[in-house]
Image (tube, rainbow, N blue to C red):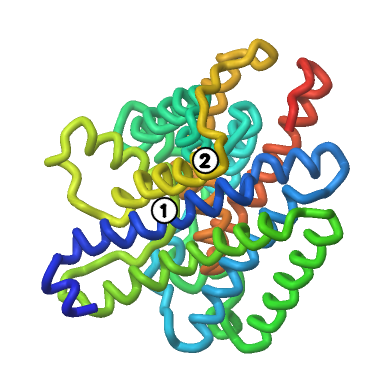
Amino acid sequence: MEGLIDQFGEGRLMLATGAFVGIVFGFAAYRSNFCLRAATVEVAEGHVGARLAVWLIAFFTGLTSVQLAVAAGLLDVSDARQLANTGSLSGAVLGGLMFGSGMVLARGCASRLLVLSASGNLRAIVTGLVLTLVAQASLRGALAPLREDLTALWTIKGGTARYLVSPDTAATPWLVMALFGLLGSSIVFGLKQKAKPADLLFASLVGLTIFAGWQLTYLIAQSSFEIVAIQSITFTGPSTDTLMAFVNARTVPPSFGLGLVPGVFGGAMLAAIMRGEARIQRFELDVPMERYLLGGALMGFGSMLAGGCAVGAGLTGGAVLSLTAWLAVFCMWIGAVATYRGLQKGLPRQTA
């Protein structure tokens, strides 16, 4: 790793790492139909099936592989921002509810919109741009003061307080064994729901990309003389950086996130072309355009408030046992289920 750093530098190496992880994630997410929104729809409709199984397998694969590496002494996530920095419980709750509601309105979370964009889905492209612009405004623009006020309502210190379980308990052999049990149960559940074995395999690959992001950036950080943040897959922050890089590349230094977003797009496009599914898809009459735009706006603000999107909080933050990340994804489920059921009562039926 030191030789690669000397040859390419930390920034370019992080950029290449993000691109590699992104390509694999994009391909696997497209092939498995990985989508938190689809899983919540199954729960909201009162029947669990293959979509829920895919999400559970991806979640537990990421969680189990990361905690196994931590238990084996191969990975240290204590410096990750999801654990080391001050966290916001109010942000996790409010942002999670907003994001969950938004992804139902927009018919996809941030990662799903990016994956669908690569297949020619114009709805996903437009909604994703709205999400990214609102996220940027929430991070550094006009919406930043509101986000900061809501974040400050209920905060917790970084360190031990942000672990879902105590650091002494986390990543013990007993915990890892329990996680393997949950992962195995998810696979059995998927097979019972008659999910395609290929979908379950690619769902596991989605989870493994979460581990790959953490492990590879950790190795770079350990070998670098510069301060390098360990991280894994998330989409709202990197999407805003990618957009800014298109506007003015000189203002955005090379980073993991800057390679991630184009990588996911490329991997998903490759999968769509290989399956013969790449085609232009427009807005549909049965779902008004304004619902997509509102959903994108809610996800943009909600993800910045919650500290991550459905993947950034749900899988990446969840894999390191971050309390705020688990709370955020729990609230995403609540917001999504409540919104979907509300739509069924008062608006035309929305397909899964």
The amino acid marked with disc number 1 is Ile
Q: Position of residue 239 (x, y in %)?
A: 36, 40
Q: Which residue is mark 1?
A: 23
Q: Which residue is mark 2?
A: 272
Which residue is located at x 60 percent, y 46 percent? 93
Relative to 72, 57 lies left or right: right
- Mark nearest the camera among 1 and 2 is 2
For the image shown, how many numbered marks are present on the structure? 2
Does any portion of residue 152 appear in the rendered image? no
Q: Position of residue 153 (x, y in %)?
A: 50, 45
Q: Residue furthest top?
A: 285
**Quarter of the picture holding the C terminus:** top right
The amino acid marked with disc number 2 is Ala
Q: Position of residue 123 (x, y in %)?
A: 52, 23
Residue 51's place in the image compared with 205, above or below, is above
- Label 1 packing within 10 angstroms: few (<14), some (14-19), many (20+): many
Q: Earlier in the sequence, mark 1 or mark 2?
A: 1
Residue 171's place in the image compared with 197, above or below, is below
